[in-house]
Amino acid sequence: MTLNSNDSENPNQVEASGEQEPSEAAGEVESADTVEAADSNEEPEVKPQPAAKPAGAQPAAAKSKSGVSGKVIAAVLVVVLLGAGGLILQRSSSGSRTVKLTAHDMQVIFQELVPPQKQQQIAADPEEKKKLVGEIKKLLAVAQVAEREGYAEHADIKSQLAFQQDVDLNTAYRKKNSDAKASDEEVNAYHLAHPKDFDDFLQGNPRFQQQAQGPQRDELRKQFGEFKVIADRARKEGLDRDDPTRLQMILDRAQVLAGAYLSELQKNADKLVSDADVEQYYSEHPTDFDEVRVRHILISTQPKEDAEDEAAGKDAKDKKPAEKPKTLTKDEARKKAQDLLDRIRKGEDFAKLAKENSDDPGSKDKGGEYDFFRQGKMVPEFDKAAFALKPGEVSDLVETQFGFHIIKLEERRTAANPTTDQKVRQGIVDKLKAEKLEQQIAQIAKDSPVVVPEDFDATPKVAGQPQTSSHRLPGPGRSSSVLDPVSA
């Protein structure tokens, strides 16, 4: 059983994406007490962070049905990748928590919690540094509003907050004690002392209820007991006062609260957009509604999936498993793609060559065809090249994170008016909702007393030094046990 999991997309499929559900990791909400950074005279030990594993690449710039735009979701994900340093909680006169980071705190965030590649980008570009600061402030400010409005007192959210706190304590303890276990006696003693805790946990965390059906219930109950015992050990050892753990707990609390707050904003966002707004947007942005139908050939530079070979092996046990296709280097892929482009320029059939050579499983059997899509649905390089073509034209080689593409424009059209096409209307409504929600969030950040300084040392961490932080990147799908945050 796992805490949660994400189905990975096929990395070679360059298909126009449908609209995605918003990320659950919604922005950082401030809590109801002022968090002021403690000054520290002790410089953090500079140690490298392991490179973050890249997520499965998505070709399309998907939009959220909820109306929260990609920028807001990106802002949320900044905090998924970050922690904070050196904070203490202070009660303000208004009773709300405000996070006030020092330059030292931001240096710790930057050097300890930002992935090395991103550190290099931020160090090289002052705008990236400002963006990091701005997004952190935005998320912390939203968090503050959520707690001020009482979200932390909602029964389901309170349960999630308690669970997340124990997750962070387990992570910190297991970071120091990788083989940590709780004995059956300790687990049984916990359940005897807290007979209702497991049922209350299930009640407040519906995603675990299905996993607690039938014979799995006893195993989950045992894991829950061990999980609580380890969290209690961490508290007794004072790990909740350790900067990395304490700050991780602050950030994860904020994530839970922000998720609830933004979800509520999204539910009411339809009221923000009128029919007149939709008509005005359509008339002022006519090119936004151009659609193109294309064929393309992808020569991939990514590792080939062998799932089809495994499936074939199940159906034909006596056959020798097919050898996994070789991953081409960039130079090899470019040369192969250029050879195909030369053949197309000489008159060979594009669809036939796509079927025989394309590495995109989503389109190769259709001769490389993708049906009509609007701008913003594909990765930027592909999108730009496709919309620059005239019907019948074939592009030069187009490089994306997937490899090298050859694109042929088959047809271009303008989408129907939103008064007659509900799909077009809904697309405009979603876009306008997202903009209005972003404006609300930006205003919250502007009015917030949250402090996130820009004048921190953005010198990337020296490579080769071990990492001291027990920071865990929040996110689903990291556990082999339901309640073990670091066993994977």
Image (cartoon, rainbow, N blue to C red):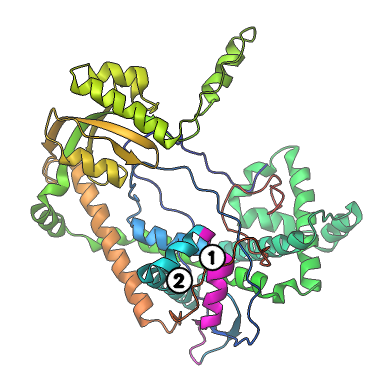
Q: Residue at x 19, y 23 (%)?
A: 345
Query: Disc 2 on helix, strand or loop?
Result: helix
Q: Is residue 17 visible?
A: no
**Is residue 369 part of the magenta span, yes or no?**
no
The vertical placement of 398 against 477, above or below, is above
Pick out the residue farthest to the right. 185
Sort mark 2 into few (<14), some (14-19) or many (20+) by Cα contacts within 10 Å. Answer: many
Give coordinates of residue 220: x percent, y percent: 74, 47
Provide the residue span drawn in magenta. Answer: 93-116
The vertical placement of 272 against 126, above or below, is above
**Is residue 98 part of the magenta span, yes or no?**
yes
Mark 2 = which residue? 136
- Say what amino acid the circle numbered 2 marks: Ile
Could you give the CA–CA distance between mark 2 and mark 1, rounded to whole angstroms? 9 Å
The vertical placement of 263 against 450, above or below, is above
Give coordinates of residue 26: x percent, y percent: 46, 61
Query: Disc 1 on helix, strand or loop?
Result: loop
Give coordinates of residue 76: x percent, y percent: 45, 62
Q: Indicate which disc, 2 or 1, sits on the residue closer to the N terminus.
A: 1
* Residue 319: image tag: none
**Apparent side of residue 76 relative to residue 189 in the rendered image (left or right):** left
The vertical placement of 29 against 200, above or below, is below
Pick out the residue farthest to the left. 283
Mark 1 = which residue? 82
- Say what amino acid the circle numbered 1 marks: Leu
